[in-house]
Image (spheres, rainbow, N blue to C red):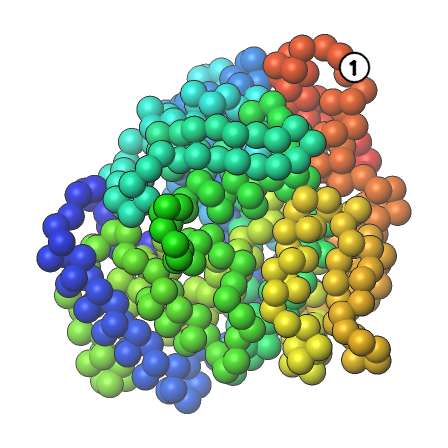
Amino acid sequence: MGLTIDRSSFTEEEYVHAGSRLRENLSALKRLLDRPGFGVGEPSLGAELEMCIVGPDGEALPVNKEIMAASSDPNLQLELDRFNLEYNLSPVMTAGQPFAAMERELTAALKELAILAHPFDGRIVPIGILPTLQTDQLQLGWMTDLPRYHALNAGIKRMRQESFHIRIDGEEPLEAEFDACAVEGANTSFQVHLRVDPDRFADCYNAAQLTPPLVLAVAATSPVLLGHSLWDETRLALFKQAVDTRRHKHAWRRMARVPFGHGWVRSGAYELFAESCHLYPILMPVCDDADNVSIVEGGGIPPLSELRLQQGTIWNWNRPVYDPADGGNLRIEFRSLPSGPTPVDMMANAAFHVGLTIGMSHRVDALLPAFPFRYADYNFYRSAQSSLDAELLWPSLKETSPREIGASDLCRVMLPVADEGLAEIGVDEFERDRLLGIVRDRLDTGITPARWQRETLHDMGDIPRDIAMRHLVEVYLDRINDYRPVTEW
């Protein structure tokens, strides 16, 4: 988040000071983005994998600190709940076979984590939402005991001033109450970062906003929460509600802190950071004393710590990222991709998303007049609900726009665009064919991670739901340990 969080309570004066610091950060960023050559460089990729820890019974096991203590890997991090861990992959250049490099590192990390978890009777599960989760495992007592998480929870509750009520429609609608944002720990994601030159940021970001429904259609992996059959990618509905700071009793409500977006980007990255500063109250008013404007005026790269912390508490599904390291750069963080099932599945999802973003970035500006932003928002949630069965809207310059098209058909049409985008950033042909071939296999077979889970549960018949969920986790673990894509299960 850019700053160390060592406490969870703050004074009103600290909130006022943090607001002033945030505006100073924004001014420095504007000057920096106006600097010729800032952030220009070869495209690269990075990623973070969130995962669950389960015990012998397939249920959540709260031993993340114990596993962390047994590890010497600096890329391993604690996550929100005590059954969550996160692994940060090393950045790679996009030329050559970047996804194969990430796949090798991720596979090795998962094998090492399995060894570390074994003495605690634990097993590692990359999965969007763990099917065996229970309501009492998503309460405050299960939150990882770190100051930054307590500060996050306190900041959300300070604004929300009510319990965390979750309501999600679906085949078996769910309503539940929680006492903390620990409920968000039910979600685990595979978050991919793509470095983008500042002068290409608007087109790439708009393309990244247009195309997630296609990726979700083939990648959905979260059909069950608390024993209820819900959306194919239930994470999206849960996350938005789990960290919502808005008060429902008010006649008007602020923007959700998990937004799909507020409109197409018109000029560049600055407007997205400005939205974060102006539209969202500060959750954690932690500040440093860097003179960011003077640093920029002196030719340096400012830390912008308060801005980065603010960004870390606004969870856009495609999030703009400023990084001061190595001369500074801008990235797009793709946050809608789910964790799991296997490393190669996750790489196929990432390749499809990145390829579509780059491939559509040269077309998107011409398409935007034919596609108001609300249609992109509509598509995002329709795809999360129904994945390959979703009926999506798509822009057209040859007829009245938009036109309606099935998600599966649209994905098939857009595969060559993804291939074109990957080729543009130097991904070699073998890598492109291998990963996009996995996407094509899902379209041909109709098998996605979510559909595999639904079909596996259906095949169990009318056994008690809790037993079915435990069995589902066991079969899932058995399959992912073979490291084959879900279409070969």
Residue that sits furthest to the front in the current view:
251
Q: Is residue 196 above or below residue 224?
A: below
- Could one spot residue 91 in this view of the protein? no
- At a point 56% along the width and 25% down the height, the residue shown is 226
Q: Is residue 168 visible?
A: yes
In the picture, residue 367 is in which quadrant?
Answer: bottom right
Q: In which quadrant will I find the N terminus?
A: bottom left
Of all residues, the one furthest to the right in this rendering is: 444
In the foreground, 356 or 248: 248
In percent of width and height, residue 246 lies at 37, 49
Q: Residues within 10 Å of mark 1 (few under 14, many from 20)?
A: few
- In which quadrant will I find the C terminus? top right
Report which quarter residue 174 is drawn in.
Answer: top right
Q: Residue at x 39, y 69 (%)?
A: 275
Which residue appears at 35% of the width and 30% of the height? 179
Q: Quadrant of residue 328?
A: bottom left
Name the residue carrying label 1.
Answer: 461
Q: How many marks?
A: 1
Callout 1 amino acid: Gly
Q: Position of residue 300 (x, y in %)?
A: 28, 79
Q: Say which of 338 and 255 sits in front.
A: 255
Q: Position of residue 332 (x, y in %)?
A: 52, 64
Q: Position of residue 175 (x, y in %)?
A: 52, 30
